[in-house]
Amino acid sequence: MGFAYTNLSVDRDDLRDDVLTGLATSPRSIPPKYFYDDTGCRLFEAICRQPEYALCRTEQALMATRMPDIAAAIGPVDCIVEPGAGDCVKVRRLLDTLDPAHLVVMDIAGAPLAAAAEPLSRDYPNLAVTALGMDFIHDLEAAAPYLPAGRRLVYYPGSSIGNFPPDAAAALLARFRQLAGAQGRLLIGFDLKKDPQLLHAAYNDAAGVTAAFNLNLLVRLNRELGADFDPSRFRHYAFYNPVAGRIEMHLVSLGEQDVNVAGQPFHFALGETLHTEHSYKFRHDEFSAIAKAAGWPLKAKWEHDGFGVQLYG
Ligand code: AVI
């Protein structure tokens, strides 16, 4: 049925502005969406293959084994919408089962998204595929004109919602509600609370891949903002905070050091932290309370080996 790609990215220097703002606040922090340059995407795929990081495998196992139930609970849909679709692999299982007429995928990395989405229109000849290169966290509403009428399913797998603080997660879910429309549904995956030792190990894999993923952010800033970070003078530090219910990921300065970023000087004291990511873990009831506040009534839930999937709408 065809393929169309539109680049909706607004010409803004978000990376520079967000990084300079984040470095000027205390404690310093950089939004986790900036992990995902080409190297960051490859390192994240490698994280998913680490024995300690089960999240991706358990979600896939859940979707493989429970798909008939999940499809029955979703019912007929005309359009699947996937924000942050990346390599467009996960949605194939839904396309195989739900057989919608339209798929709308969006991702901040527009060119790789287009390359991944285009083959879907060949593999599913009755499917119209629309790929939107856009920062959906900023501009989700810009996708509205590309959504066909009919019953929509917003699909947000992978526990990406866990990388938002609870307030921001609720705000994003409320915007998904608008996007889905009154008859719409939301299928969302998230990492469940579990033994903190397992969580700690998942973000401190023995092969050091998560450390490389975290430190790659500094390499990206050196390349794209003319910064002069020495990654060997920062330590990857990730731990589970059971009070806040989240993994916290930091880069800790191993000494006193001065760094220039986009022409501006910053001093890092010994032990000072640059916070790079939160990864919230939920119980089913905690997650459904957040979604309920965002206007989504819970319809069904599933879990497998520490991973949860919920259906709303
Ligand atoms: C993408 N996101 C769900 C991952 C997570 O587990 O929060 C990103 C990640 N960070 C370190 N390892 C994986």
Image (tube, rainbow, N blue to C red):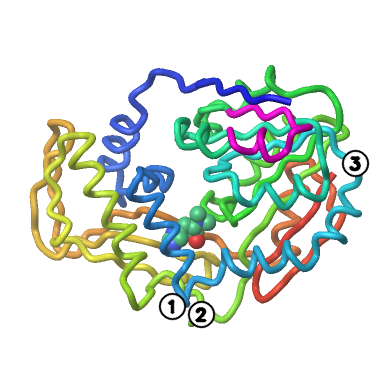
Q: Quadrant of the C terminus?
A: top right
Is tag 3's residue or tag 1's residue first in the polypeptide sequence? 3
At 85% from the left and 53% from the top, the residue drawn is 71
Rounded to the nearest angstrom, the CA distance separating label 3 from label 2 is 38 Å
Closest to the camera, between mark 3 and mark 2, is 3
At 12% from the left and 54% from the top, the residue drawn is 230
- What is the magenta range? 118-131
Closest to the camera, between mark 3 and mark 1, is 3
- Which amino acid type is shown beneath numbered disc 1? Ala
288 up-or-down from 103: above or below: below
Residue that label 3 marks? 76
At 38% from the left and 61% from the top, the residue drawn is 249
Residue that label 1 marks? 201
Q: Nearer the viewer, residue 46 or 162?
A: 46
Name the disc covering residue 198, or none.
2
Counting from the top left corner in percent of width and height, residue 178 is at: 74, 30
At 61% from the left and 22% from the top, the residue drawn is 4
256 up-or-down from 29: above or below: below
Indicate the quadrant where residue 235 lies: bottom left
Q: Secondary structure at mark 2?
A: helix
Cβ atoms at labels 2 and 1 below 8 Å apart: yes
Q: Nearer the viewer, residue 257 or 207?
A: 207
Name the disc covering residue 218, or none.
none
26 relative to 309 in the view: left or right:
left
Q: Quadrant of the N terminus?
A: top right
- Which amino acid type is shown beneath numbered disc 3? Pro
- Residue 149 part of the magenta segment: no
Is tag 3's residue or tag 2's residue first in the polypeptide sequence? 3
308 relative to 235 in the view: left or right:
right
13 up-or-down from 295: above or below: above
Q: Residues within 10 Å of mark 3 (few under 14, many from 20)?
A: some
